Amino acid sequence: MVETCGDAPDVASSGITFTPTDSALYQTLGEYLKTVLPSPFRIRQGQQNRTPSPVGPYCVMQLITTRLLATNGWFYTDASRLVTELREVTVQVSAFGTGAGDALKQVCGLWRDFYTTDWLQAYAPILSPLSAAEPRQLGFVNGEAQYEDAWSVDLKMQVNYQRTIPQQFADKITVTTYVADLPPTQE
C-alpha cells in the first residue's frame, strides 16, 4: 500500500502537465460553498486521516465519480499539443450538525441557479454546474451513540481537463537537390 499525504504532483515524469488536479477542484468547490453556506458551517475535504470532526456544524466534500462526456479535442502551440477532456464530475457534499438539512437545501437550490454559473465563470471557468440530486437525510450516530442531524447531496459539474504534451516541430527545412544518374529511356 502506498502512503501519501495529498495529491500527486501535476507534472508526470514524461513532462506532460495537467489541470485541474483533484486538490484544485476541492479548493474551488470549498471556496464556492463558503459563499452559500450559512455561518458557522466549516468545510472539509473527505477522507482525511487522523483529523477530528470540527466543533459545530460542518460539511464534508468527497469526489465520488467521473464520467467522460465527449471525445477529446486538441490544438497545437509552438511547442506542444493541448488536449481537452470533458468530464462529468460528481462530488458528494455531506453536512453534519444543527441546520444541516437547511444548509444543503440552500446549496442544492443555488447549484441550479445562475448565481453558481456566474460565480464559477468568474473564479473557475473550467467548471460548470450541471445538476444536483435531491438532498437526503443520513442516519448518523456519533461516538456517544447520539443521533445527529446529517444530510447529503450529490453535485454534478462539467470539468474541462487540460493536458499539455510537449512536442517538437520543424519551423524551417533545408532542401538540397541532387541530379540522379538515370538510365536513358527507350521509346
Image: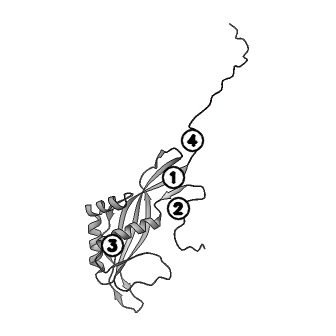
Q: Amino acid under label 4?
A: Phe
Q: Are marks 2 and 4 in contact (CB under 8 Å)?
A: no
Q: Which amino acid does label 2 sit on?
A: Asp
Q: What residue type is labelled 3?
A: Lys
Report the disc number at residue 10. Answer: 2
Q: Mark 4 points at which residue?
A: 169
Q: How far apart in space, not on screen, are marks 2 and 3 (Cα)?
A: 26 Å
Relative to residue 180, is residue 118 depicted above or below?
below
Q: Residue at x 69, y 22 (%)?
A: 178
- The residue range painted magenta reads 172-181
Q: Main secondary structure of the magenta part?
A: loop
- Which mark identifies residue 164? 1
Tag of residue 130? none
Q: In this view, does 42 lie above or below 21?
A: below
In front: 177, or 139? 177
Q: Tell me which amino acid carries mark 1.
A: Thr
